[in-house]
Image (tube, rainbow, N blue to C red):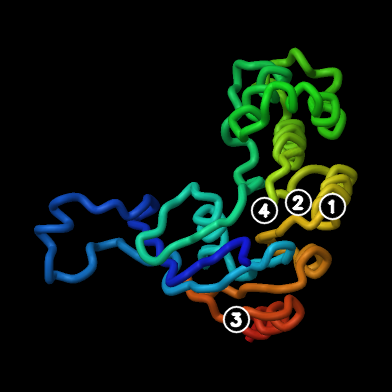
Amino acid sequence: MTAIEVVGLGVRFRRNRRGRRTFKDIFGRRGRGRPPGEFWALRDVSFTVAPGESIGVVGRNGQGKSTLLKLVAGVLLPDEGRVVVHGGVAPLIELTGGFVGDLTVRENVRLTAGLHGMSRAEISRRFDDIIGFAELEDFLDTPYKHLSSGMKVRLAFSVVSQLEEPILLVDEVLAVGDKAFREKCYRRIDELLADGRTLFFVSHNERDLRRFCARGLYLDKGRLVLDGPIGDVLDRYNADNAPA
């Protein structure tokens, strides 16, 4: 049984937007090669993830790491290949998306948790824990747009980390916030992993990758270069990117 199955995955972009082709592209350019400005963010990527595995995705900026997470989350659709996810995902990516500026903290928790699939009864049961984790007890009736950027991240992490989905997707969120809150996030992720969750983790922080992940995927120019133990993957990545 697999938690995530990725086969021949490819996704194409064009000049900072998704590579949606027009009828002119399809019929007018037949036989004339690739449209100008088009490139493959990922190409021919295949791997599987077993339930309970912790996977770290490694690579320089712009090599397809965050794109891969969005494909697994279902935020993007591939142009080639397929992604099959067995079970729901808790996406700790682009954390503050989906919150409404004019709604209060209280209203945003109920709205966002509901959009992620929590029932009203479950939201009520978890509400105090969400607010307590985010340390926003004194801001329940404050419009979201008036929160600091750190408060917004705390609230978003708190909501999403309360989801009971079996697969956790994490994209650089531990790089934000103050040290005390990062440590709080670390402990929460440790709890989720101890509960048997599957972790798919993108980070540039080698210490975090070694802490949370047993296995690594090294992406370079949109291709999967190495799939192996996280120590071996980080050693290869560091060797390839060492100063000349």
Q: Amino acid at mark 3?
A: Leu
Does residue 40 lie above or below 85 as drawn? below
Instruction: Specify the farthest residue to the top.
Output: 141
Return the residue at label 2.
174
Q: Determine whether the residue tagged by mark 2 lies in a helix, strand or loop.
A: helix
Q: Earlier along the polypeptide chain: callout 1 or callout 4? A: 4
Residue 60: which disc?
A: none
Residue 114 in percent (x, y) is at: 63, 27
Q: Earlier along the polypeptide chain: callout 1 or callout 2? A: 2
Give the Cα distance between marks 1 and 4. Answer: 16 Å
Residue 167: which disc?
A: 4
Label 2 CA crowd tier, 10 Å (few <14, some 14–19, many 20+): many
Q: Earlier along the polypeptide chain: callout 3 or callout 4? A: 4
Marks 1/2 in contact by CB < 8 Å: the verdict is yes
Return the residue at label 3.
226
Residue drawn 72% across and 25% down? 147
Marks 3/4 in contact by CB < 8 Å: the verdict is no
Does residue 116 lie above or below 180 as drawn? above
> Where does the N terminus fall, quadrant-wise?
bottom right
Label 1 CA crowd tier, 10 Å (few <14, some 14–19, many 20+): some
User: In this rendering, would 40 be left or right of 178?
Assistant: left
**Comparing labels 1 and 4, the label whose residue is closer to the camera:** 4
123 or 231, nearer to the observer: 123
105 or 243, nearer to the observer: 105
Instruction: Specify the farthest residue to the left.
Output: 28
Tell me the quarter of the picture where residue 95 sits. Answer: top right
Residue drawn 53% across and 60% down? 68
Q: Determine whether the residue tagged by mark 3 lies in a helix, strand or loop.
A: strand
User: In this rendering, would 90 be left or right of 195?
Assistant: left
Return the residue at label 1.
186
Tell me the quarter of the picture where residue 26 sits. Answer: bottom left
Q: Amino acid at mark 1?
A: Tyr
